[in-house]
Amino acid sequence: MSFAAGPPAVLLATLVLLVLPLAVAHVTMTTPNMTKAPQHQDQQQDQDAEDPKIQNLVMPNATESFGVTELVGVTVASTLATWPPDSATETPCPGNQVLSGERRGCGCPGQLVKRGENCTCPNGFKQQGTAECADLDECEGGPAGPCGPHADCSNTLGSFLCSCHHGYLKGQAGCEDIDECTLAAITGLQACTGGAKCKNTPGSFSCSCPVGYVLVPGGQSCIDVDECSFEERCHRELGNECVNTPGSYTCQCKAGFTSETSACADIDECGKTPDVCVGRGVCENTLGSYRCACPQGYRGNGTHCEDENECASGQHGCDTNARCGNIIGSYFCQCYQGFSGDGYSCFDVDECALSNGHCQHSCSNEPGAYRCHCNPGYQITEDEHNCMDVDECAVQTGPCEQICTNTDGSFQCSCRPGYELHVDGYQCVDIDECKLQRGGCSHGCTNTPGGHICHCPEPLLLDLDNTNCVNVTSCKLRNGGCDHVCTVRSEGSVQCSCKAGWELGEDLRSCLDVDECSDFTNGGCEQLCINHPGAFNCSCMDGHEVRMDDPAKCRPVCDPPCQNYGVCVAPNTCNCPAGYPGPGCSAICSPPCAHGGTCMRWNTCLCPPGWTGLGCHSAICELPCANGGRCISPATCQCPSDYTGPQCLTPICTPPCLNGGRCVDVNKCACSDVWQGARCQIEPIHCQTGCKNGGVCVGFNRCRCSSGFTGNLCDEAVTTPCVPPCQHGATCGPHNKCICPEGTAGLRCEKLICPVVTTVVSMARAVRKAVRESYVDRCGPLGVQLCTKYRVNQARVYLQAYRVGYKIQCPEKTRR
């Protein structure tokens, strides 16, 4: 950068040349160096630095310092002063200059420069000592310094530099603020974008946004504020909704609302369009909209409603002791037999409180029923009311040990002779007669269960009275004491003998059995000999049986028996002829004869009707199986997947033909009427009989009915059932009112009243308290309910009683 004071220095040099011609050449060399262009400054400074005469006079970066003009002037003056004067003339040096030894002129010593007639330090330096100069720090001045309040001062050698702060530019008065907003408008650039407004500030600028916008974080542009996202000003509860707009927002009514003076009002779509819901659907207005719902007693989505079976789904209020009956659009409740109430609340009826439940003995009430009980010793009869005596003695084991005698409601035990009844009343204890006077025996007595036996010592015998003992003199008395044969000898003594197979014992009276099988002959039996009292018989070992022609011999037994002329030679071993190697000399067929066939001889089966082939495994079908079918049993074909029928002649369509279509070939349907599609599944919009009452045909003989009509052709008027339902056969009339038949009353005809026709029961004079007519909805024990009315005049002295009866259908009581 060039010196700002260059031209005044040239003017001064010119004036000096005019006065001092001898110094022109030197001035000419110095002046251009001081007035060089800025781009050659650095080169010139390097050249000047090599000259010791001007080395101390050049200041670096002088372009940014103040007072350069004076420096140039001093330089020129110094140069002129050092020009050697006339050697013949020697004058003293002015000021504080010193005399130069070589040139004999006056000059400044060291780093001092001439300023006027005196020697001083250059601008930007301060003197130290006699001839030395030190750099002066101009930036140590006041708070603002030499650069002003909006600039930064940087000291340099002999001078200083000023740099303006950001947002300031150097001007005549120092660093002046840059108006970025005006500069952006002039240059076409935008300091603030996105609709932001620019505002100049000292050293900078700021951006601001209009109402409804905010600055982008860290930027100079504006974005719209969505007031609807954080501020509720539209009162959504009143049907409004907020709509954001650039810089603002608006409130408008939601769909289903209409604008009024201060808010949005809900539109009643049900009142505006009553028929908005088709079929049985009921329109229910909602806030801002509506919905179609099925009425109570129906289920569906509001467009298609069908009766809801509350009894099957459990969505009913019937008591647990009541029966639920479903009706179209509703249901009814009826208490079970044995309970009383309206069906929604049922209470148990105590049947035992009325005539003991007609039980013969005792009655116990149970939930919904009652039970008759009998006293001990009695059992209930088939009518479950009466009791009959239990014959305890008829039981096979019986409660008594010996003799049982039945009594009314109980029994009595007794014992046979020789026993006495135990203290428990059931068992019998034997009586020991021998302890009571020896049981009446003359000699010996032995007690037996229920009696006793008298016995005599030999040779005495017990007399016919079984008590006394007498001598033996005849065979007439107890066969003379012999077991078998008694014989009277000639001398009058008795002799005993035995039958065949017996032998006389040592007491010569009793007979002992003879064991015929004990000798070596084995009783003459071939295999086994079995002894019996007085006899024996022969038997055979396992696998043998006694021969019919000789009971003492045995023959082997074969099971199964040998057939086809086979001979049983050992137990279960047959000697068979050729061709019959099977068990019992039977024929063997391989494979075995199936389906009831009989093997006649080796591998030859006699097959039953309908079967043939090896082993009777091939079935016979009189009518052949077609289309690849296989005969699997007589007259039964196993068909492939595409055919069916007895002979596999009927084709199959998968999936099957619908809506009356007929399968005429495999997966080929012939549709009936006007149905279409591969499976006759496409329903035509065709009603053979036109829809009535404003209905619209929506399918095949199917109409969509207008409000108030139903049925396939919309020819049936919709009858809304009463809720709750009418009872006792009543019909539902308009406005959910029940039309009660004769004998019923109430809002739902739930009360039964007495008939109008009455029968006079009695005429009497008495004073009776008038009673309120009442009715209890339950069946009596006999299935008939009685209603009694009393008519009492005002004086209450004359009574006329009427008993009126009516019969209701009571279910048969379940026996328990």
Image (spheres, grey):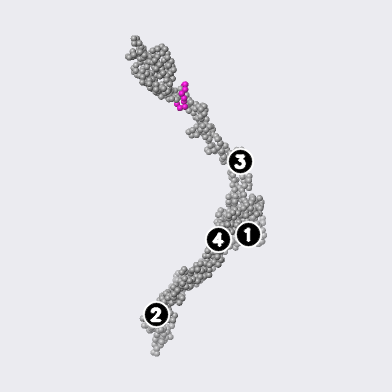
Residue tagged by mark 1? 787
Q: Secondary structure at mark 3?
A: strand
Q: Circle 4 sits on which residue?
A: 643
- Picture coordinates of residue 686, whole percent (x, y): 63, 53
CB-based contact (under 8 Å), mark 2 and mark 1:
no
Q: Which span of residues is magenta-colored?
A: 165-173
Residue under label 2, please give it.
526
Query: Mark 4 is on which residue type?
Result: Tyr
Mark 2 vs 1, N-terminal side: 2
Which of the two marks, 4 or 3, is nearer to us in this view? 4
Of the image marks 4 and 2, the number of the one nearer the N terminus:
2
Q: Amino acid at mark 2?
A: Glu
Residue located beneath label 3 in the image: 258
Q: Position of residue 101 (x, y in %)?
A: 32, 14
Amino acid type indicated by mark 3:
Thr
- Would residue 60 be visible to someone looking at this image? no
Q: Local crowd at mark 4 within 10 Å, few (<14), some, or many (≥20)?
A: many
Q: Is residue 172 magenta?
A: yes
Q: Give the left or right position of residue 522, taking residue 627 as reference.
A: left
Q: Locate residue 268, reporting x and y percent.
A: 61, 44
Considering every residue shown, the one lying at the far left of the view is 101
